[in-house]
Image (tube, rainbow, N blue to C red):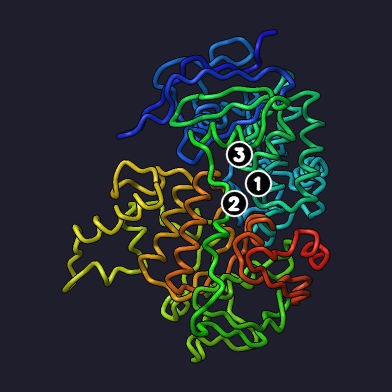
Amino acid sequence: MQPLLELRKVTKEFPGVRALDSVDLHVDRREVVGLIGENGAGKSTLVKILAGIHRIDSGSMLFDGSPASFRSPRDAFNHGLTMVFQEQSIIPTLTVAENIFLGREQEFLRFGVIDKRAMNAAAEVELAKVHLDCNPATKCASLDFAARQMVEIAKALSLDGRIDSDIVILLDEPTSVLERQEIDLLFEIIKELKAKASIIFISHRLDEVLQVSDRVYVLRDGAVVHETASTEATITGLHEHMVGRQLDHEYYRENKQRELFGESVLSVRNLTIEGEFRNLSFDLAEGQILGIAGVVGSGRESFARCLGGLLPPSNGEILVDGKPVRLNQPHQAVLAGFGFVPSERKSEGIVTGLSVSENMTLAAGDRFSRFGFIKFEQERTECQRWIDRLRIRTPSTKTPMQSLSGGNQQKVVLSKWQIFGSKVAVLDHPTRGIDVGAKEDVYELIREMADQGVAIILLGDTLEEVIGLSNSILVLKDGEVSAKFQAPVGAKPDQIELISKMV
């Protein structure tokens, strides 16, 4: 049978790097193909070629048997290929309906004016496909991250029924911000879509890739290094093909977990943000890692943003080294010694127009200047040290941040606060969108930070991650602490214990 989509010897180069190297790949009709690889392996470049964002340098692409080269995402969409991006493309100031039909407003024109009632009615049909119960006239800014992700998926699904031929949907890390119930729902949607669509599923969660895919491609250094049927693959085997080596079995570096801590650094007393969380109290010492567990809406994300100076508290007290501090603005949090790694790195963690080195030293600019002049050599040396330490894939320290893959951007954010020298690190999903090999680097860095006396608050990407990395765990439910667990090496709580206190 002729594949619906096929790449033949596709190569793509950017200044200083070959992103794709003679890639062969095909997607059959009504098939789910998993695409995995480390950050910087070429996954994003490949799907951006498919989506019409990048052009092929050499090689060819065939769609439904005919040569294809999409000039833009709109061109790709009109031919039957659409993408849900890992970094959301939702425009917060527009409504749900306006986002779903962005660029297709002419379909709802009536006497030269957009018929909002008709657009909202059509949006309700798409929202029903993802079982998202919200008013299509709602501004997307009022939705949480997971809900906006479901709007993204609804936008992609709106292609179904508009194109007569088979369609291809690219799902780039679609589950990274979803809870288990929402992930199960998405997988049910994917099963339904297979009746008419082919799907390319990209995820760092290899168990999900094997669960939902028919076949899996592994990319490494821009080339396909392995292809297999999902039924014949194992997570360990895929890991090793991705990184080109056997993985360290001490995945969370529990053998390096500290059990003795220094002086108390952070004290939180009855901290409250009305409508988000209330009466949070705890103490955190030098070198201690405190995990925060809870479902979306439990208050954990708002708590992290509060410590980052992004959400001012309504009541309560925060003390650093025994002295009260105000965290009503991000700069106040920085001055108080907090380093905040946000979950939404693209919009809050990096400045895309600046270089790698400029992002790394953004919080510690005074260290690299004298009499108003930047000490470029000192800056370059320090940044190169962190590039080597975290294996950040970048041609140089001067490379623009937007040229890096998402995972490498996240490593830059982490190094920024190490260079600054934060007393307290607030890590909000620090491994979201990062591949398994890069996660090892981040876990190693977190252990090193603890050894250096940094007090760490961790909102993990999974419960397993929170348990594996933390010394103690607070569980939030409906904005309140529902349980506290100690998590020493050899006596970690299990996931069931935590889940029972989360829901």
Q: Quick check: can you spot residue 118?
A: no
Q: Earlier in the sequence, mark 3 or mark 2?
A: 2
Query: Residue at position x 44%, y 19% from top?
Result: 22
Q: For the residue carrying disc 2, how many other residues have a C-alpha within 10 Å: few (<14), some (14-19), or many (20+)?
A: some
Labels 1 and 2 touching (C-beta < 8 A)? yes
**Residue 30 location in percent, x, y?**
74, 21
Query: Residue at position x 54%, y 76% from top?
Result: 260
The residue to which callout 2 is attached is 91
In this rendering, would 199 be left or right of 338? right
Front one among 383 and 290: 290
The residue to which callout 1 is attached is 99
Question: Is 266 placed above or below 367 here?
Answer: below
The residue to which callout 3 is attached is 172
Q: Label 1 vs label 2: CA separation?
A: 7 Å
Q: Earlier in the sequence, mark 1 or mark 3?
A: 1
**Residue 169 location in percent, x, y?**
66, 30
Q: Earlier in the sequence, mark 1 or mark 2?
A: 2
In this rendering, would 326 be left or right of 151? left
Q: Name which residue type carries label 3.
A: Asp
Q: Label 1 vs label 3: CA separation?
A: 18 Å
Q: Name which residue type carries label 1.
A: Asn
Q: Name which residue type carries label 2.
A: Ile
